Amino acid sequence: MGKVRIVADSTSDIPAEIRERLGISMVPLKVLFGEETYTDSITIQADEFYEKLKASPILPTTSQPSPAEFSELYERLLDEDPDSPIISIHLASILSGTYQSAFIAESMLERKADVTVVDSKSASYGIGLQVVRAAEMAQAGESKERILEEIERIQKDLQIYFLVDSLEFLHKGGRIGRASALIGSILNIKPILSLDENGGVYSVDKVRGSKKAMARIAEMLKEKFGDEPVGLILAKTDNKEIADELGNRVKEAINVKQVGYTTVGSVIGVHTGPGTSAVFVYRV
């Protein structure tokens, strides 16, 4: 039995240096500005994407990888080591057909292979945390079964909150209704958003203004974790100051032992828009 190989897609928003260090294989999604097609985190990086998004008169769309793209990668990994199990972890199936593409790809393989496709039930670094932990365990020689158990534990334990600058992008992408978006923008109401147990977007609470929203997030994290030692991943889009302010509020409220940073990539950014910030908190 070879070492477990870990596959993710680009919506996991794992920085390239971490992917390379841990040997994580990545299948990218695509972003389309009208007739122009970009490959997420390969031909368009997050910073460039947000500049383009703010300047573009048209709202971009996204497209998932095809089953063939996944099966080609699986075949390549199997060529390198036919005995290695593969764990392939992807964007919540409720948000995208990416998981389904990976699942179909597994059935397309022309050889017997041990491929497990996992619905992360999350997005951005909610997937990233699962992938990075899986890759660390794989490097340490842990079994496929132990890695899958740990992925399941992270899914149950992880707490995600995010704030968007404008509800327009979630509305246009079909994630929330028009009335919610309109009322929010008129009254400066900031919904505190999260992902449910399947990865669907929902509003946890609504408050007036960003500062009150950040304070409420810190309060809810304190309610969940108390003084337990936790890790924090702070995600920004194009406004580092907002993300830093949110991070500082959280660090004041709970017992943060590890801090990491990431940038929300272009595919998730299509749906959340510029000015978004997020926290991913987990027990350590």
Image (cartoon, helix red, strand yellow):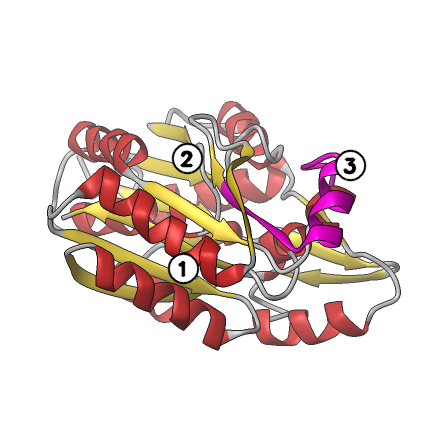
Going by the numbered disc 1, the residue's amino acid type is Ile
According to the image, label 3 marks what residue?
A: 179
Residue 73: give x, y in percent of width and height.
Answer: 48, 46
According to the image, label 1 marks what residue?
A: 14
State the residue in front, 261 or 86: 261
- Residue 112 image-quadrant placement: top left
For mark 1, does the 10 Å Cα neighbourhood hold few (<14), some (14 to 19), or many (20 or more) residues? many
Q: Nearer the viewer, mark 1 or mark 3?
A: 3
| Residue located at (17% from left, 34% from top) | 1
| Residue located at (16% from left, 44% from top) | 226
Horizontally, is 8 left or right of 100 in the view? left
Mark 1 and mark 2 lie on one chain; the one further toward the N terminus is: 1
| Residue located at (47% from left, 39% from top) | 90
State the residue in front, 199 or 160: 160
Q: Is residue 176 magenta?
A: yes
Horizontally, is 172 left or right of 207 in the view? right
- Residue 105 image-quadrant placement: top right
Going by the numbered disc 2, the residue's amino acid type is Ser
Residue 106: give x, y in percent of width and height.
Answer: 48, 28
Mark 1 and mark 3 lie on one chain; the one further toward the N terminus is: 1
| Residue located at (35% from left, 71% from top) | 17
Residue 217: give x, y in percent of width and height.
Answer: 38, 50
- Highlighted magenta segment, given as a residue range: 173-193
Disc sitting over residue 73 in the figure:
none
Q: Is residue 148 magenta?
A: no
Horizontally, is 280 left or right of 284 in the view? right
State the residue in front, 39 or 191: 191
According to the image, label 2 marks what residue?
A: 120
How far apart are labels 1 and 2 at the CA level? 14 Å
State the residue in front, 217 or 172: 217
- Residue 149 image-quadrant placement: top left
The reply to whether the C-beta atoms of the residues labelled 1 and 3 are less than 8 Å apart is no
